[in-house]
Amino acid sequence: MSKDVKKVVLAYSGGLDTSIILKWLQTTYGCEVVTFTADLGQGEELEPARQKALLLGIKPENIFIEDLREEFVRDYVFPMFRANAVYEGQYLLGTSIARPLIAKKQIEIAEKVGADAVSHGSTGKGNDQVRFELGYHALKPDITIIAPWREW
């Protein structure tokens, strides 16, 4: 664990896990936290995520909520359908296919705000951490990745 992180962009849903991670990042790393919430069509969950981030001490200019619906459907969902990509022959890959797009936008925001780290709330036992982290490494190999579930 590197304690010299100055600013981190957190993939933030506004839920319990990422809200705890937000405070943990502030406390453990003493760094500035920037939240990024991807709008993939969840609608009514977006404003509560903004409000919770504000409540947890995030400055308004450090809260990013980006509408990714069109890009998600055009560049990720449609190609997935065309490839007939389903898990175990029956489940659509909606959540998993979104992770590379979220990682891409996180890196864009990190570059925009001068962050030296990114963070996600994926558990250390699942594939989502791989989906996020391969995206981070591919787009910005020198970025520090903070994966709280692995550190805990």
Image: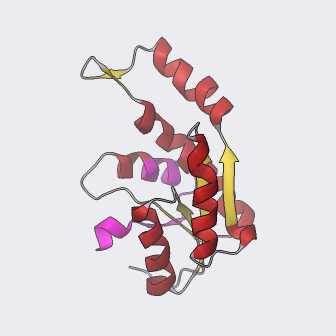
Q: Quadrant where the C terminus lies? A: bottom left
The magenta stretch spans residue 150: yes
Locate residue 65, reporting x and y percent: 67, 53
Say if 70 sits above or below 18 in the image: above
Figure quadrant of residue 47: bottom right
Image coords of residue 23 (percent x, y): 48, 78
In the image, what residue occupies the spot 54% across and 49% down?
103
Q: Start and end of the magenta stretch?
A: 132-152
Residue 20 is covered by the magenta coloring: no
The relative height of residue 39 versus residue 86 in the rendered view (above or below) is: below
- How many numbered discs, if any? 0
Q: Please tell me which residue lies in front, 1 or 140.
A: 1
Camera sees residue 54: yes
Residue 39 visible in this rendered orientation of the protein: no
With 2 as the anchor, is 113 left or right in this view? right
The quadrant holding residue 116 is bottom right
- Front one among 140 and 25: 25
Q: Quadrant of the N terminus?
A: bottom left
x and y percentages locating residue 43 in the rendered image: 61, 41
